[in-house]
Amino acid sequence: MLVVMKRDATPGDIYSVKEKIASMGFAAHEMPGAQRVAIGITGNKGKINPELFNLMSGVEEAISVSKPYMLVGRDAKPDNTEISIDDEVIGGKELAIIAGPCSVESYEQLMQTADAVREAGAKFLRGGAFKPRTSPYAFQGMKAEGLALLREARERTGLKIVTEVKDVQTLSAVAEVADVIQIGARNMHNFSLLEAAGELRKPILLKRGISATIEELLMSAEYILARGNKNVILCERGIRTFEPYTRNTLDLNAIPVVKKLSHLPIIVDPSHGIGMWDCVSAMALAGVAAGADGLMIEVHPDPPVALSDGYQSLKPSKFRELMEKVRQVAGVVDRSVAAEVTE
Amino acid sequence: MLVVMKRDATPGDIYSVKEKIASMGFAAHEMPGAQRVAIGITGNKGKINPELFNLMSGVEEAISVSKPYMLVGRDAKPDNTEISIDDEVIGGKELAIIAGPCSVESYEQLMQTADAVREAGAKFLRGGAFKPRTSPYAFQGMKAEGLALLREARERTGLKIVTEVKDVQTLSAVAEVADVIQIGARNMHNFSLLEAAGELRKPILLKRGISATIEELLMSAEYILARGNKNVILCERGIRTFEPYTRNTLDLNAIPVVKKLSHLPIIVDPSHGIGMWDCVSAMALAGVAAGADGLMIEVHPDPPVALSDGYQSLKPSKFRELMEKVRQVAGVVDRSVAAEVTE
Amino acid sequence: MLVVMKRDATPGDIYSVKEKIASMGFAAHEMPGAQRVAIGITGNKGKINPELFNLMSGVEEAISVSKPYMLVGRDAKPDNTEISIDDEVIGGKELAIIAGPCSVESYEQLMQTADAVREAGAKFLRGGAFKPRTSPYAFQGMKAEGLALLREARERTGLKIVTEVKDVQTLSAVAEVADVIQIGARNMHNFSLLEAAGELRKPILLKRGISATIEELLMSAEYILARGNKNVILCERGIRTFEPYTRNTLDLNAIPVVKKLSHLPIIVDPSHGIGMWDCVSAMALAGVAAGADGLMIEVHPDPPVALSDGYQSLKPSKFRELMEKVRQVAGVVDRSVAAEVTE
Amino acid sequence: MLVVMKRDATPGDIYSVKEKIASMGFAAHEMPGAQRVAIGITGNKGKINPELFNLMSGVEEAISVSKPYMLVGRDAKPDNTEISIDDEVIGGKELAIIAGPCSVESYEQLMQTADAVREAGAKFLRGGAFKPRTSPYAFQGMKAEGLALLREARERTGLKIVTEVKDVQTLSAVAEVADVIQIGARNMHNFSLLEAAGELRKPILLKRGISATIEELLMSAEYILARGNKNVILCERGIRTFEPYTRNTLDLNAIPVVKKLSHLPIIVDPSHGIGMWDCVSAMALAGVAAGADGLMIEVHPDPPVALSDGYQSLKPSKFRELMEKVRQVAGVVDRSVAAEVTE
């Protein structure tokens, strides 16, 4: 159930609706919009009679929601969600450019990459400290040491840090360093982690699971919003199909579809999506043309020696060239990208 | 086996190599390139000793081909294939814009659409006269009558005609009217039809099967080239995945991958690919940004009454708007699109 | 629309209904059942008013069909279809065992295999004379010569012949030799071939396309039945999924589902389905346990030298062992398999 | 690296090899077999020189492992793993029959089901107390209260308890009650949970992820074995494919493939696999015929009122009928099933 308030509803009207919902034993979720407020109701098992709200002061209409999600949907909040991180915004006119190595590997590797992506115009540095890996014998990340290096990189460059959390146990350590906490594709259905992330107020970058439908991605975001954290950024990073040539099939169709269904921002990770460095730029440009709110790109100063995902990483020079084209395509679709830093 | 000739090989050198191949009972396929000629050998069952050619006059090297395809690969012909259709070229700098209704339905519907897409800058008119349909009870197209209307539309507008052939039996009738003969996704593995198309010299637009790998698409093109028809245009039109929200999953990853592996042009059909008119423009722009050589877009003057695929068709006004954006994205990736016709 | 007749409807009642349908410009398809007759109506574009038939003599009820198929559905014919081929029946209590090489390769290979599978209890010999192949350079079958060998094998062993038709052009040649005409997975959506097969009255073995849904398989069978050929046997042979270890994913789920939806018999091809000889027996037994009406198994006297599919072929001795187990599992699910021939 | 010991290697020989591995800073995993012992080495980043072990006393050979898994592979342990749970064994001749409701819902529901499945011959009771659900608003299980009911059901019936763990936080509570701890499909890539399960010695039932390859399933089992818990039972429960009619596509191909690659037992869950109660029996029988080591079947006394998965649950009477057929098919493939309890 969604109670849509009138444009001129007073704070008192809103308070009354929320109180009534609480008195019924349900949870009220206030969703402020540019034009009006909507209040989602969760916790009910059966249908709620809309008449209970329709006659209250300030209520435009109470509508039953047939889609399985509610808080993430456009019905609940018609205008785009913009997420502020200090002076940066994700979901606004400027595209969020997140770049950096797959894994934090060393001081030199991280600082060299951070400097390079900052100069090319990125505002966010990615880098994994805790790495979920298919094999128990593969490099699992530098862990706490990696987090410390990321903190240092932020101090050095001013870049915001995007890094992945692997489990509930290490969430608070990651949250201390990260400006945006990434939940990876393999954890998209880790509901306990989603719930814990929902208790935070830091932005969460939620990646689509390798075989998750768009609706399932939205439902996982709903888990986070239902706990009160409205700062969720979705990320398309490729799905598993029958095609063996590419690592995954980057599903850019998800961009216009998510934009239609949800108010949350969505970015694209072409590096994991196609998995071959020489095809990353084409897919990055395509993602921006399709309407994505940002890009997440793997950049490594020396891809052949990377401890993970070297084959899909761009060299800094290649990244800088890509950024120039990204700026131009962004302009065509009424978006912008920060300029190169030329000092 | 591929015999790559030297840049200064004489016509006599080339003749000698082809004669030698013929004397061994195999077929020789001359592949002229901008810089040099390569000669493909097919028909052999086992390995051929490269030494038989390496010492001949004008031969640079004879190389064994490990990929399953040969004539369609970049090894055989490093530079892009450009296909001329009178004064139009597919695969050159200018993008091929193919637009029109899914099915030819009536004189008014076709002429109205043809006029509109021509004015918006399209150079090719699409429209199905023979329609392969999943149900035997669905509209199967206007057939011969539809072909006659397409011929009339060409005379009226000057647009080149792209129309689908459904089977070998109707191939010659279709070939008489079509400037480009389309082989649809469900016929990508109809080898008898591919062979018949290979005997023609008209351009063939070969659509990727709904569950065909990129390599299988190239192998089907190889069937056509192996019979001597080098005028093949590939088309990505969406693959079948687990995602239920979109009609298909338009696989734009195929664009940079095909560009890497093959010299053939490849275009994108976002209408079938995503299957929802309000998402077609996003995917069309993404396809151009990804490097496609053209677009195939369904346009209908009155989508709700279309006999097939109305839900994914653009109205003429929407198509014109899209074309304006396509022109701009094309410019970013060093391509161009014909201007609107403003008389 | 489906007109279900009463149990005691007279031939005259049935005739009247069919005449009425014809007078409306539609086609009537009589579907005789054990208990009652149903008459399918096709060719109508819009809804037909059921009242037009409900009051006629001998009519039980006229029901609108919401599923996209009609003639193949259980609504049209509740009891199982049994297909007679001389003295053999497919779809009855005895399982149809079809065995033999992927391709006909030589006199010795075919006769040796035919003798062996006959002795093990098979009643049908498979063997391809026309082979659809992904590569234009792969062995395409012995063609007419292969058909002649199959004819000879039938004379020698009494086995019925199951062989694949590749296109409309060679259909009559294949139909002359085949007792059951196979339409392969890649032709399941070759509608012109389906229509031509529908004009025949010989049994058609229709294989599920590699990415065809169960409903699409039924729709392709509908094409054949709609032309009057009711002798269709479906075949599950593996679908394309993300799993790379097996050649295909044999989808045994299709067996109980097809049994629920359709009256047509369905058999299983575990050889193509899983694609590894040492796993074929497990999947064959599983297919019988799941309720299949028969098995199609590749058997080759010397798999390593087979011109196609050697890796998935059983040796005759292994096939004989499998048959012994098949007999026992068949007994558990109230089916039977012919005994070994021991003279 | 895998060090295979001679059949007559002494405990002292084995000790020396393990000590040498430890001295190199790696971990040694002793894998006792019926005929000989193998010792797996993990923790090394590069190749280890086999010569370091080949000359040691009692060593048959030291072999490099090219597959990504080691401890779960047949190379490490050629004979089947049998897992003892008090007086029951999973992976031996007798099939493990696990049955019960999807979710524990009430005292009556659980005890009634437990009594019924015990009488039909099941030795294990399934029932979820912690339920991972796609929607945050769906029933999430009775949690601690559900565990208490499961404990009571064990005391009442003697059935062993199989119940799912959702996260690391509740693992110890679940482990206190469960005889077999289930890790569900959505947690197959929850590496932190796998590691925690690896620290236990209780048997773990690891379900295949909905889009996990067979190799990935084995890698997740490897995570558990690498921590020292060798008691892992795999479970095929259906994969996600393009087919919309069935809930999932139960991939029985995984049974013979896993049997070939791994020594671990594997069971089948046809209820989730096909997702329709009237097709469950066919797939259960097929699973046994394919060689599974057991079945996991959803049984509910009143499916239409189940809080989850009612549509795929069997009634007790139907389950008893199925068990009778399962016993017969088991006999054909040299397996057995406990008799009905008739007192």
Image (tube, coloured by chain):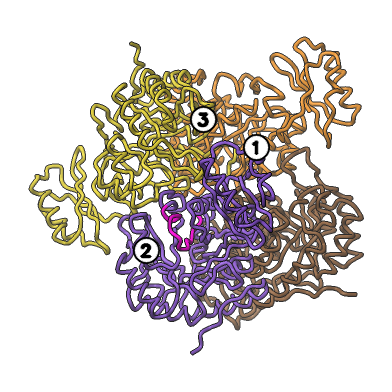
Chain colours: A orange, B yellow, C purple, D brown
Establish whether labels 1 and 3 are both on one chain.
no
Q: Is residue D194 visible?
A: no
As drawn, which residue projects farthest toward the left? B12
Q: Quadrant of the N terminus of chain C?
A: top right
Q: Which image quadrant is residue B68 in?
A: bottom left
Q: CA distance from mark 2 to mark 1?
A: 49 Å
Other-residue count near label 2 (Cα within 10 Å), few / some / many at <14 / 14–19 / ≥20: many
Front label number (2 vs 3): 2
Disc 2 and disc 3 in contact, CB within 8 angstroms? no
Residue B337 to residue D197: above or below = above
Other-residue count near label 3 (Cα within 10 Å), few / some / many at <14 / 14–19 / ≥20: many
The residue that label 3 is drawn on is B310
Disc 2 and disc 1 in contact, CB within 8 angstroms? no
Q: CA distance from mark 1 to mark 3?
A: 25 Å
The residue that label 1 is drawn on is A215
Front label number (1 vs 3): 3
Regarding mark 1 in the picture, which secondary structure is present there? helix
Which amino acid type is shown beneath numbered disc 2? Val
- Label 1 marks which chain's residue? A
In magenta segment, residue C200: yes
Q: How many marks?
A: 3
Regarding mark 3 in the picture, which secondary structure is present there? helix
Q: What x and y, as percent, mark residue C327?
A: 60, 77
In magenta segment, residue B186: no
Query: Which residues make up the magenta segment?
Result: C196-208
The residue that label 2 is drawn on is C174
Using residue B44 as the reference point, say whether residue D304 is left or right of it.
right
Nearer the observer, C34 or A194: C34
Using residue C232 as the reference point, say whether residue A7 is left or right of it.
right
